Amino acid sequence: MIKFIQCVRRRQGLSKQEFADHWSEYGKTVKAIARASNSTRCALSRSLAVEQNLEIIQDRGTKSPYDGMVEIWWERGNDVVAFLDSGSGDQLIDELRRKQEAFMDLPNCTFFFASEDA
């Protein structure tokens, strides 16, 4: 199983509600890419503003949680490579990048591919 993961921080000055609004629209494009690339699963998550998160930060000395996270799964790496190489998703990927630039603090986000260990 191959995953593409995005750990997202909102742009400075953007409220949590403004982030949520952008996130909802961003999710539509993410899901369209997931469908077009024959992914097996796609999930978007936002962090919760709960006391337990603050306790973890204080107790463990970690950074604050990401504002959002995207995960897209494929059975085989060849599936995503074929999609990217075909050019069929170029318009969706360009749209995704424009949306990222509008509301994400890109230098403080993390995007990566990973394999799921059994």
Image (cartoon, rainbow, N blue to C red):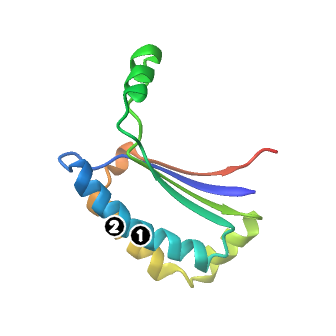
In the rendered image, residue 27, in percent from the top left (x then y), is placed at 43, 66
**Element at label 1:** helix
Location of residue 15 in the rendering, given as x and y in whole percent from the top left corner:
21, 49
Splitting the image into 4 quarters, where does residue 56 fall? top left
1 and 2 marks in contact (CB < 8 Å): yes
Residue farthest toward the left in the current orientation of the protein: 13
Kindly identify which residue carries mark 1: 96
Q: Is residue 84 above or below residue 49?
A: below
Answer with left or right where residue 97 lies relative to residue 4: left
Callout 2 environment at 10 Å: few (<14), some (14 to 19), or many (20+)?
Answer: some
The one of 26 and 105 positioned closer to us in this rendering: 26
- Residue in the picture at 43% in, 72% down: 28
Where disc 2 sits, the SS reads: helix
Q: For the point 38% across and 45% down, which residue is it?
A: 67
Where is residue 11 shown, x and y percent of the image? Answer: 26, 50
Residue at image mark 2: 99
Q: Is residue 100 above or below residue 11?
A: below
| Front-lying residue, 102 or 64 | 64
Which quadrant of the figure has residue 71? bottom right
Q: How many marks do you count on the picture?
A: 2
